[in-house]
Amino acid sequence: MKSRCALLLFLFVFAASWAASADEERERLRVERVKVEADFAAKERECQKRFVVTSCVDRARRERRQDMDSLRKQQEVLDEADRKQRAAERMEEIGRKESDQDSRERTVESAPLPREVQRLPRERAPRPAASQPASGHRFEDPHKAADEARSREEYERRQQEARAHRIEIERRNTARAASGKLPAKPLSVPDAASAASARR
């Protein structure tokens, strides 16, 4: 456990220092690009003052292309290192999740059955995962059975609430009709011309 904590601490420190140096490198490349573009613009202006403009501008463009290619290659190296770093972090995260999942499965296997499952008749009670037959038939997870029981209770409660709500609405409508109040007029449906103008 200590070695794992030490490894995680090392990875965290390495990632933090790598991020700082990568950000510095990105900023340096950005500044270099701006400088190359500024140099090209200055050379192009200088070429416009000469008699043979085309060959001068072509030379300036060639120099700019070479400089930009060099900076692009440096950016690609930096991006590839970032991708590798993110992949390593992702693999570490997957490893942590798998180990957490394994420990949770071991905890579930060793946990006692819930009371709802213990109260079931003996022949209907699901067997623990360790005693499942090798033929591929699986029995329900005891926690799943408890969740399903809770879901059924929740469903019944919602059904009762819906019935009570319908009864209340009917009672209100009956009282409103008995008092002589007219129901509210429905909203008018707009014609096509007014709907088109509303969209604009």
Image (spheres, grey):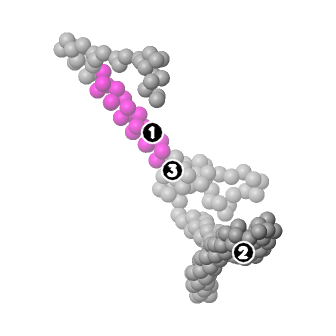
User: Over which residues does the magenta segment extend?
Assistant: 150-170
Of 27 and 155, which appears nearest the observer?
A: 27
- Rendered view: 162 above or below 50: above
Give x and y (percent) for residue 148: 52, 46
Q: Are marks 3 and 2 in contact (CB under 8 Å)?
A: no
Q: Are marks 1 and 2 in contact (CB under 8 Å)?
A: no
**Which three-letter amino acid code belongs to the residue tagged 2?**
Leu
Of 81 and 100, which appears nearest the observer?
A: 81
Give x and y (percent) for residue 67: 74, 75
* Residue 155: numbered disc: 1
- Rendered view: 61 above or below 177: below
- Rendered view: 118 above or below 4: above
Give x and y (percent) for residue 94: 65, 69
- Eye-nearest disc, 1 or 2: 2
* Residue 71: numbered disc: 2
Callout 1: few (<14), some (14-19), or many (20+) C-alpha neighbours within 10 Å?
Answer: few
SS type, badge 1? helix
Q: Examine the structure image and report whether residue 168 is included in the region drawn in magenta.
A: yes
Task: Inspect this view and state whether residue 61 appears.
Answer: no
Give x and y (percent) for residue 188: 37, 16
Q: Examine the structure image and report whether residue 56 is included in the region drawn in magenta.
A: no
Task: Inspect this view and state whether residue 123 appears.
Answer: yes
> Would you say 180 lies left or right of 27 here?
left
- Rendered view: 162 above or below 152: above
Q: What residue is rendered at 44% in x and 16% in y?
A: 191
**Which three-letter amino acid code belongs to the residue tagged 1?**
Tyr
Q: What residue is rendered at 75% in x and 53% in y?
A: 136
Which residue does the numbered mark 3 point to in the structure image?
A: 147
